[in-house]
Image (cartoon, coloured by chain):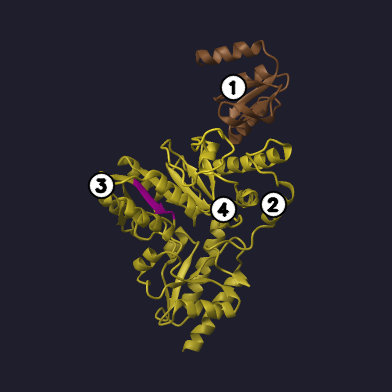
Chain colours: A brown, B yellow
Amino acid sequence: MHGHDFFIIAVLCFMKDCLILIGSMTKALQAQKILEQHGVKSDIRKTINSKDGCGYCVFAPNNTKNAILVLQKNNIKIKGRFPLEGFS
Amino acid sequence: MIYLDNAATTFPKPKSVLKAVKTALNDYGGNPGRSSHKFAIKTAKEIYDTRLLLAEFFGCPKIENVIFTPSCTYGINLVLRGLLKNNSHVVISNVEHNAVLRPIVGLTDSGIKFSKARISLKNDDETVNNFRKKICKNTKLLACLSASNVFGAKLPIKKLAKLAHDNNALFLLDAAQTAGLVDINVSKSKIDFLCFPAHKNLYGPMGLGVLIINTDIKLKPLTYGGTGVKSRYYKQPDVLPEKFESGTINVPGILGLKAGLKFVNKIGTEYIFEHEKDLMLKFYNAALENIAGKNIIKFYTNDSLIKKFPGVISFNFKNKNSELIASILDEFNIAVRAGLHCSPLAHKFLGTLDCGTVRVSPCIFTNKKQIDKLISCLIKLNFSQN
């Protein structure tokens, strides 16, 4: 793991639930499958707020921190996170 | 109708494929990878699951490297045009289908050069050696078919892939005739690019192909447009598979392919192969036995070639145009294909460029009664010639 990744996890420990930006639909579905395999339930949501424009996120209610750890361990790149308020 | 043109497209399709296409139109109408409502995500999940099944079936470690294309030919064009630059050299076999030959010939206008390596029907090492002789310092790619759609010659894929890599080149396999009939594993056989259609031995609908990429080498896309990802950027995103799937993908086709793949998986490629082999050996031996002498009917195959790959058999009646024979068989409600089969190179190899051949190709739904009927029709034709 890189220092940046530790930072994300540290920040998220103190954050509420949020959308975890993955990127394309294919990658988001891959992330969802991995979360499912690790017992983490999640939905696919979309945001237009990423710097790239449209992007697909996974949302694991009440389990964001765990979801991020699972995704990191399984080499799924997390491109950012968005608060639930104001997502599209 | 007795349908023996399965090398063109398999028919009938399994009931599960028909059901899957109907279900796709009724229940999976959301555009996957565009919206985020439940309806779209439901469709996207099915598409993802199909990629997963294909990745498992063909030994591809990365799901995102399974790309849906409008056809096998499109996938081949994508690789050739996306990879080759000015002064690149490609080696192909001397029996390639136009799906490989024509894009390469088209690219010669851009400075691409190519050589044709002669295949050997008796000795795979000779085929490999002939490819080796054509390789030069600019060779970037070896491209070949897995089995000929005209006379079924099967090429030594693993050895050719190794030859390519030993010479710092990549390997493209046109598996139009073999995907679903013969086991193909891109990881074990070290195939860099695998192209195949949904609608032949995978029993899916027409209008869909698949490209599997098993290399980190980047290709330029063939089409550019909306991908549903990184939409703020004017440039085509570099994210797989979306990079190569601009526009809306063929959802009913893909869900049909998923059902076809499950069908093939359930029965097993080995079983299907043995089934077709038994039928084609029966046809070949019965025709030779019952039609007066080898001078009347000429087969462009033999027992050993049929056992290696039973997907197609080509033949001709002496001094009779192949299209005439096919049209007479059509009167008997037997569907075969005649002519050059989009493979002028294969016909040049066989010496049939001027007359073409009549091609018979079975599938899992072909049965012995149908083959018996074909043989009895050919015997009638023979009598009427005599």
Residue that badge 2 annotates:
B20
Residue that badge 1 annotates:
A80
- In the image, residue A83 lies in the stretch drawn in magenta: no
Magenta span: predominant SS is strand
Q: Residue at x 30, y 50 (%)?
A: B111
Residue that badge 4 annotates:
B208
Discs 1/2, front? 1
Q: Is residue B291 left or right of residue A58?
A: left
Q: Position of residue A5 (x, y in %)?
A: 54, 16
Report the disc number at residue B171: none
Q: Position of residue B278 (x, y in %)?
A: 54, 64
CA distance separating discs 1 and 3 = 47 Å
Report the disc number at residue B136: 3
**Quadrant of the rendered structure where residue A22 is?**
top right
Boundaries of the magenta span: B141-146
Q: Secondary structure at mark 2?
A: helix
The crowd level at tag 1 (other Cα within 10 Å; few <14, some 14-19, many 20+) is: some
Q: Secondary structure at mark 1?
A: strand
Q: Secondary structure at mark 4?
A: loop
The crowd level at tag 2 (other Cα within 10 Å; few <14, some 14-19, many 20+) is: many
Discs 4/2, front? 4
